[in-house]
Amino acid sequence: MFQTRSYPSAHVGSSCQSGWEYVTGLHLEQEAPRVAEQAAALTRADECPSALTTVVLDGDQVALQVHESVGHPTELDRVYGMEAS
């Protein structure tokens, strides 16, 4: 079983060459109640059980995980201790 909770998308097709019309086209005011309820539901959810298990990740998640785990720590500004953010 899996769930995808992302608006407007999970890094797929959520970018384009446009201006403010892109933001207004998202209809955030219409999606806000649903997104807010999903976020609140996550705070009420049962804690994940602790167990040794297998996790299956799709390519997008693997790419993001590698980027965050390996990409950022090896960036030169971080290596030199001069990271601005």
Image (cartoon, helix red, strand yellow):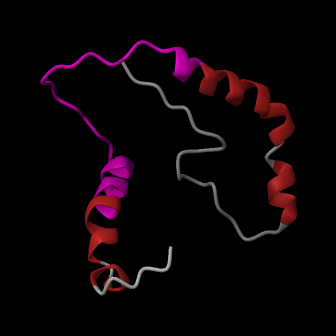
Residue that protrudes farthest toward the left in the picture: 52
Question: Any magenta on residue 45?
Answer: yes
Q: Residue 6: where, in percent of width, then height? A: 58, 38
Q: Is residue 4 above or below residue 40?
A: below
Q: Nearer the viewer, residue 76 or 82?
A: 82
Q: Who's the residue at 58% across and 18% down the image?
A: 41
Give the side of residue 14 with respect to residue 27, left or right.
left
Q: Is residue 23 above or below residue 54?
A: below
Q: Who's the residue at 61% across and 27% down the image?
A: 39
Q: Residue 42: where, in percent of width, then height? A: 53, 22
Give the side of residue 40 with respect to residue 11, left or right.
right
So how many labels did they put on this image? 0
| Figure quadrant of residue 74 | bottom left
Q: Who's the residue at 42% across and 80% down the image?
A: 83
Q: Nearer the viewer, residue 80 or 7?
A: 80
Quarter of the figure with the N terminus: top left
Q: Residue 32: where, in percent of width, then height? A: 77, 33
Residue that protrudes farthest toward the front in the picture: 81
Give the side of residue 77 with respect to residue 51, left or right.
right
Q: Which residues are magenta?
A: 41-67
Question: Any magenta on residue 19?
Answer: no
| Figure quadrant of residue 40 | top right
Q: Nearer the viewer, residue 85 or 32?
A: 85
Q: Who's the residue at 53% across and 15% down the image?
A: 44
Q: Residue 14: where, in percent of width, then height? A: 63, 55
